[in-house]
Image: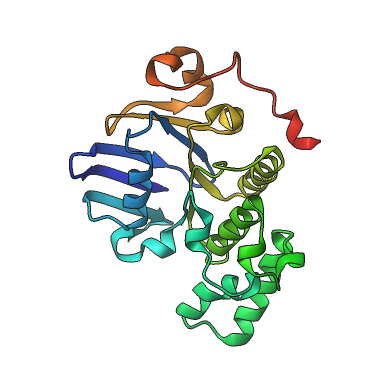
């Protein structure tokens, strides 16, 4: 499990304590400016914070400050920020090359990832020619090829049309079903609430609610905290269309 203990960042995040269990799907929500994206960047080790982010792995404790890229993988809201290769295949290979993987192993991993994410048809495409949904899919593949313990997603549905949202949500659901740990930030919580196990609400840099979605759903004054919910937990059967 990933454990965050007494995390402070400037005067934005204040004494954050939470646990993300292996294989769980956790949704982080809150008003704009509540500190959601900032928390993801702290967990990823991009910001210098006070406190601890540690991963418990079969009795071994890994400090995310020392090995954040082995523990977590962050997909930014702007997928273009993460895409650096001249082609999709070269982009997938980039992180492995930075870790000095064997060339043949890189080739094998890239081929496996292209197939796993159903983006084999994009392998020779220049990233600049991809749609928003395709770029987001490639950005997630970029992270997952590195085998992080926890996948961090910052507003994965931003600026996507209906089909793009549907495809990315199907991909996230598939990764979760395969056993990957998902920690997702979004203000569009109606798209994903019925699929998540756990819910955390941030307000002014503090956790004001956390627990199981099914336990919290009817106890949260959604409009008072700036979030919109349409009736009961939504049916997600449209994902199967």
- Relative image position of residue 56 (x, y in whole percent): 38, 53
Q: Residue at x 74, y 59 (%)?
A: 118
Q: Residue at x 32, y 38 (%)?
A: 35
138 with respect to 47 (left or right): right
Q: Point out the residue furthest to the right here.
A: 241
Q: Residue at x 33, y 58 (%)?
A: 64
46 with respect to 214 (left or right): left
Q: Point out the residue furthest to the front here.
A: 129
72 with respect to 230 (left or right): left
Residue 144, image quadrant: bottom right
Q: Is residue 144 above or below residue 133?
A: below
Image colouring: rainbow
Q: Is residue 124 above or below residue 175?
A: below
Q: Is residue 183 above or below residue 237?
A: below
- Relative image position of residue 143 (x, y in whole percent): 53, 61
- Relative image position of residue 168 (x, y in whole percent): 64, 46
- Relative image position of residue 213 (x, y in whole percent): 51, 25
Nearer the observer, 161 or 26:
161
Q: Is residue 215 visible?
A: yes
Q: Is residue 220 visible?
A: no
């Amino acid at each position: 499990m990933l454990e965050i203990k007494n995390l402070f960042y400037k005067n934005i995040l204040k004494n954050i304590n939470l646990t993300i269990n292996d294989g769980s799907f956790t949704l982080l929500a809150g008003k704009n400016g509540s500190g959601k994206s900032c928390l993801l960047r702290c967990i990823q080790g991009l910001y210098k914070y006070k406190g601890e982010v540690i991963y418990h792995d079969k009795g071994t404790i890994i400090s995310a400050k020392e090995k954040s890229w082995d523990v977590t993988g962050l997909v930014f809201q702007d997928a273009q920020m993460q895409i650096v290769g001249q082609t999709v295949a070269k982009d997938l290979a980039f992180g492995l090359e930075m870790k000095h993987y064997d060339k043949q192993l890189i080739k094998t991993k890239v081929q496996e990832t292209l197939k796993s994410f159903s983006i084999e048809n994009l392998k020779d495409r220049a990233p600049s020619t991809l749609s928003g949904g395709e770029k987001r899919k490639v950005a997630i593949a970029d992270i997952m090829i590195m085998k992080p313990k926890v996948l961090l997603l910052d507003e994965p549905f931003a600026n996507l049309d209906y089909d793009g949202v549907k495809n990315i949500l199907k991909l996230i659901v598939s990764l979760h079903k395969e056993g990957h740990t998902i920690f997702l930030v979004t203000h569009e919580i109606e798209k994903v609430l019925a699929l998540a196990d756990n819910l955390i609400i941030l307000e002014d840099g503090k956790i004001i609610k956390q627990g199981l979605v099914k336990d919290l759903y009817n106890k949260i004054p959604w409009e008072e905290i700036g979030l919109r919910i349409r009736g009961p937990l939504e049916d997600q059967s449209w994902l199967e269309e």
